[in-house]
Image (cartoon, rainbow, N blue to C red):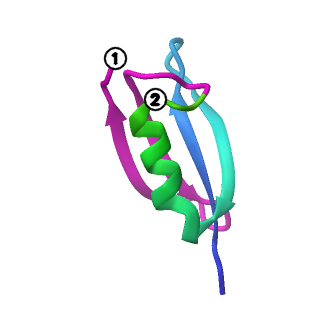
Amino acid sequence: MSREVKIEFLNPSGKWELLSEFNMEYLSMHKDRTLSGTTRAGTSTTFRAIAVDSGEVLDMWHSDEG
């Protein structure tokens, strides 16, 4: 059973904003993209992955490249 996950990022005003939603199997790929700064969230921000069904925070990381 695949699990739906969403990635959120901390925007400049200090609020969590949705970046994308996808199946759990793609989390690693999306995390790599955020760490390389190839998303609309840019660089030097905090990200978190959340299980859509439970709201559980599965992972949190910071991209400080750039």
Where does label 1 land, which residue? 66
Residue 50 vertical position relative to residue 26 in the rendered view, above or below = above
In the picture, which quadrant includes the C terminus?
top left
| Magenta stretch bounds | 40-66
Q: Is residue 2 left or right of residue 28?
A: right
Extreme residue toward the top, this view? 13
Q: Is residue 38 left or right of residue 63?
A: right
Marks 2 and 1 close (CB-CB < 8 Å): yes
Residue 37 bears which disc, if any?
2
Q: CA distance from mark 2 to mark 1?
A: 8 Å
Crowdedness near tag 1: few (<14), some (14–19) or many (≥20) residues, C-alpha within 10 Å: few
Mark 1 residue type: Gly
Taking the spot 49% from the left edge, 19% from the top edge, the residue there is: 14
Queried whether the magenta region covers residue 42, the answer comes back as: yes
In the picture, which quadrant includes the N terminus?
bottom right
Taking the spot 50% from the left edge, 22% from the top edge, the residue there is: 42
Extreme residue toward the bottom, this view? 1
Mark 2 residue type: Gly
Taking the spot 39% from the left edge, 38% from the top edge, the residue there is: 35
* Quarter of the figure with residue 18: top right
Assign a secondary structure to mark 1. Answer: loop
